[in-house]
Amino acid sequence: MAEAISKIKEKLEELEVTEIPQAVAEFMADERKGVIKLVASAQKRYENYLNEFKRLEEISAYEKECYLNGCTYVAGIDEVGRGPLAGPVVTAVVILKQGAMIEGINDSKKLSEAKREELYDIIVKEAVDYSIGIVSPAEIDEINILQATYKAMQQCIVGLKIKPDYILVDAVTIPNIEIKQKGIIKGDAKSISIGAASIMAKVTRDRLMKDYAEIFPGYDFEQNKGYGSHKHIEAIKQIGICPIHRRSFVKNFL
């Protein structure tokens, strides 16, 4: 008697993804439409796994090169918040374990908020070390956004317990640090360490802006995160600025 389709469904859904090829083999001859659909779904799941594994291998190339050149600890750094009208600029530095393959790590802008939150917790758990740098809106006005970004990056490097042998940075070269570094254009999508840092920085800043939304209501910070949305700009025109606005950024709207 053929095994019930509900039982086959249960079996396939409980499988570790690496077990799928061997497990579906016993159901390949089953011509029932329900089973064919279940086998196709399991195979698609395995195909997605292979594609993600390949992508993670590709975005680990910079780290692997560093390890081959004798590095033990490779850090990735990224920033979030250079463009908003309000709130701090936030940076993160992350040192992952050699060979780390955390599914889903990517440029934080390509991920949903829920996925970023999920990955944030995984990165915190799996990282060898990590640190956050934050520079306030007032200081951004004082020294300009580029220098503030550099300062936040320097700050998070100092905050590490483990000194990295090499640093991979998204787009820029950080001044006044002794550690060897490499700036990578669009590095948050090309380096697993920078991608991890972009997620850490984004989640940290988004959480801060949600807290600020409660302190300074009316600007829709919980939604726009300080960026220049229509609602945000209209609020500036109607009620003025608040203490976390970057005066050098909003002067055209006053």
Image (cartoon, helix red, strand yellow):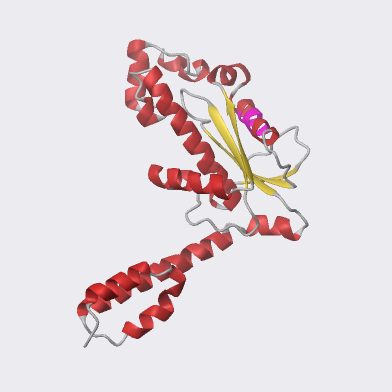
Q: Residue at x 37, y 16 (%)?
A: 236
In the image shown, does 183 or 155 lie closer to the viewer?
155
Q: What residue span does the magenta drawing correspond to?
A: 149-154
Q: Residue at x 26, y 78 (%)?
A: 36
Q: Does the image show residue 186? A: no
| 110 left or right of 102 in image | left
- Is 231 part of what is drawn in magenta? no
Q: Residue at x 47, y 68 (%)?
A: 50
Image position, residue 29 (x, y; %): 29, 88
Q: Residue at x 45, y 66 (%)?
A: 49
Count of marks placed on residues: 0
Image position, residue 245 (x, y; %): 47, 18
Quarter of the image where one finds residue 197: top right
In the image shown, does 51 or 28 lie closer to the viewer?
28
Image quarter hosting the C terminus = top left
Quarter of the image where one finds residue 223: top left
Image position, residue 213 (x, y; %): 38, 23
- Is 151 part of what is drawn in magenta? yes
Quarter of the image where one finds residue 142: top right
| 80 left or right of 7 in image | right
Q: Does the image show residue 38? A: yes
Q: Main secondary structure of the magenta part?
A: helix
Image position, residue 117 (x, y; %): 44, 43
Image quarter hosting the N terminus = bottom left
| 57 left or right of 159 in image | left
